[in-house]
Image (tube, coloured by chain):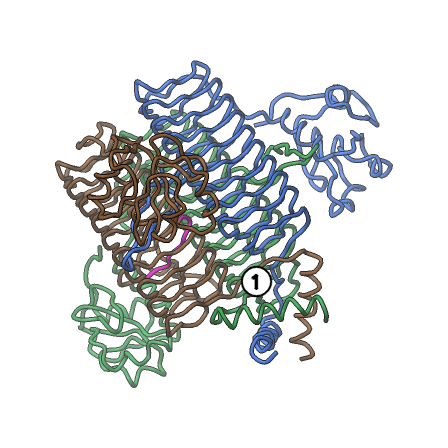
Chain colours: A green, B blue, C brown
Amino acid sequence: MQTGEHSLGELAVRFGLLLRGDPDVRVCRVATLANAGEGAISFLANAHYRKQLAHSRAAAIILSEADAPNCPVPALIDRNPYAVYARIATLLYPVPLPQPGIHPSAVVHPEARVARSASVGPLCVIEAGVLIGERVSVGAACIIESGASIGADTRLVSRVTVRPRVHIGARCTLQPGSVIGADGFGFAGEDRRWIKVPQVGAVRLGDDVEIGANTTIDCGAIEDTVIENGVKLDNQIQIGHNVTIGEHTIMASCSGVAGSTVIGKRCMIGGLVGFAGHITIADDVLITGFSMITASLQKAGSYSSGIPAQESREWWRTVARFKRLGRFG
Amino acid sequence: MQTGEHSLGELAVRFGLLLRGDPDVRVCRVATLANAGEGAISFLANAHYRKQLAHSRAAAIILSEADAPNCPVPALIDRNPYAVYARIATLLYPVPLPQPGIHPSAVVHPEARVARSASVGPLCVIEAGVLIGERVSVGAACIIESGASIGADTRLVSRVTVRPRVHIGARCTLQPGSVIGADGFGFAGEDRRWIKVPQVGAVRLGDDVEIGANTTIDCGAIEDTVIENGVKLDNQIQIGHNVTIGEHTIMASCSGVAGSTVIGKRCMIGGLVGFAGHITIADDVLITGFSMITASLQKAGSYSSGIPAQESREWWRTVARFKRLGRFG
Amino acid sequence: MQTGEHSLGELAVRFGLLLRGDPDVRVCRVATLANAGEGAISFLANAHYRKQLAHSRAAAIILSEADAPNCPVPALIDRNPYAVYARIATLLYPVPLPQPGIHPSAVVHPEARVARSASVGPLCVIEAGVLIGERVSVGAACIIESGASIGADTRLVSRVTVRPRVHIGARCTLQPGSVIGADGFGFAGEDRRWIKVPQVGAVRLGDDVEIGANTTIDCGAIEDTVIENGVKLDNQIQIGHNVTIGEHTIMASCSGVAGSTVIGKRCMIGGLVGFAGHITIADDVLITGFSMITASLQKAGSYSSGIPAQESREWWRTVARFKRLGRFG
């Protein structure tokens, strides 16, 4: 999947890095510190792996100035080795761009508009009124329903479902199984039954958004559900109707956000976090995994409520005493 | 997506509402109190939004008698404004009914029976012995496997998977990515390995059931998994084999129910709730989000076990003391 | 769905069981103790159901020697009745093997290699370089992307997504909606934004692996994500990049494992369990449902951290006192 070779000199110039070692050394692939060999570039960004540095056989290693003296091979030095690694890996492994055009097995409505430079894969369904922008890549078996629009350079990897009137911005990536714009969960109780409340809003995704596999984002009840620029959602996340997620917020897998909650910008949310509906989370909030958020968080900071596991015997003893707190305390 | 206009007088008569204001005012769309304008009908059902009433520019507002005196525009008055809103919104935004017939790209077995009034969308697969009832709408890319049956007026939005012998009742709605009747998770341990136990039951969904996006309902091991009339399941819910969920129970996203558990009628289950297997939950039980249910609940009432998040520093101090409860208490 | 009849004598010989009763009694289907009737074989493996034994009308019952004296009908006796039941049920209900060959509606790249004995269902997409082994069954609407390989006798039930270069072993079963090899969740922070880190590893599944409906397994960042032989994953599980799950480990639904975590062999993991990244779990660990695992577990044993629900009023009182522990303790 990797393509071409690059010399360290060329990489240092292109990305503004300090080079310690032979600029003519060439790299063509990435590898971990432990398993790197000829032609492989590696990186050190997590202290956890520092002990592997001394024995690495990488052709070159991206690391910080502090780690450079201990690097046994040519080094590319930067304050943010992981970001540099991301850029070099993107250069070595470009996302394969499919040929423009519409696969003959796709079912494309004559009133859909697909840019000439875009590609639509096999067995896709593109309904009336859909707009597909320049260089968009729609992988196999995607469904894009009436009136939805997909911004330039966005990639629907494969098997993505985009429901009516959803707007997706530019340079987004949507992983397989994601469903954007299914009905929000709205029911009015009456006589001990539930009446479905029509969900007539849409979903708007900004630019540079990533949506993980099997993640679901519901359409709004009246107004739209909004995912702002640069948001990154992992797999199997559920976003309820009329939620707003602020720019550059990142959320790990299996978390759920109930309806009408507003999450701020640049938040970092762990996995298996649950948000109640109708609350507001400030900008720059960090929430550790397995937390339950039932009230608004008004200021930046770190919040938690998960309890780490213990040996079961000890745990159940603790729980028994815990429950007595409420009874006799 | 909305269609037609209706006068307040007409709406008041049709739905048995008290009208305060000009019966000739016409509405054609819904809007929130805050953003409503010309031609828009809004509603007030949640005290949270009462402060927006005075400044609303809606053409009309549905609300309770208690709120009516403060309504600055024509009012439609009822004891249950949200249910009335649901009905009026359904009138203004009818679900678009596709043309009856089978899309030429669908793969339909000659031994399937599809009602003349039903529609089967592009790239569906309908296997032998399937029965599709009157006015059923099967959206794009659904799979309905051998011997399954779909009751009248049910809508498979798109990309729904219905496995063999599943029975779905009338007037149900299944959102994209839902999987009904995948194998239950049954394995017999032997010599520290697992032998798969065939899952030969089916799934039966009653009438008026809603199934959310990417929700999964497993087939029974021997007998059937049963979802009774009027049950509403949100997105990304997992229902294990041989579970029964009683009439008109509603369950929020990301919850899971392990095998053979029986949940009563009219229960309300929050998000991220986990149920152990082989337990029984009474009728009219309410469970708040993020609760763990490991034993049967014999009587109606409200149950909880999630702990709301705190600032992390404070939280970890609390947890440390908590764990000492079990050790020294 | 069941096929043929078998005499108890034949079953006793074939599976090495002790038979008490008439060897000429014939069975053709399975049933529960409570609802079994003519021609049905049942089993007793869970003490929970022992009270149903005396009144069962099964044609025969599989049970342990200890329960045999109380069996009112012919008995097949073994130390492990549930495993015997699994084998007999597999005999009575063989998985239907589709006709070999490629459905004309499937889109198969000329450079894919599909074994003559394999079947590819309707509306599948098989890309270049794919290898599909002997007797593999690829159900409707599966996507197998470039360079992936599927081992002999594996079954992709339907609507399975297999991303590029994924390797799946022999005799695996993948349920609908599962996504194997979507991008891992890797982003490097820079200037309060996120840069995508290319995910260039693959996924390797061993032999005899079961993957549940809508379960997602991400590809590795550099090296591969690995699911070893005999692992069984339930529905809606999320496995992050570079995770390893050891042989014969079994995991219940809705659990999530963050990146680079290593889970040992023969572990048993409950539902809704969350694992932090970069930790190691020993072999033979049991984790009860709803536990949060944030640190490595170095030795076999049982671990927990979920708290069972109480009546809400009592619960909130307990939580209030609990939170004071951290403040004043």
Which residue range is magenta in the image?
Answer: C235-242
Left or right: A254 with respect to C284? right
Q: Nearer the viewer, residue C301 or C157?
A: C301
Task: Residue under label 1, please give it.
Answer: C307
Q: Residues within 10 Å of mark 1 (few under 14, many from 20)?
A: many
Q: For this view, does B98 lie left or right of residue B306? A: left
Residue B7 to residue A75: above or below: above
Compared to residue A239, the image places residue B266 above or below, namely above
| Residue extending farthest left | C116
Chain letter belonging to callout 1: C
For residue C237: magenta? yes
Residue placed most toward the observer, A10 or A70: A70
The quarter in which the C terminus of chain B is drawn is bottom right
Q: Residue at x 54, y 28 (%)?
A: B207
Quarter containing the N terminus of chain B: top right
Residue A14: tell me if it is visible.
Answer: yes
Quadrant in the picture for residue C200: bottom left
> Does the magenta stretch mainly form a helix, a strand or a loop?
loop
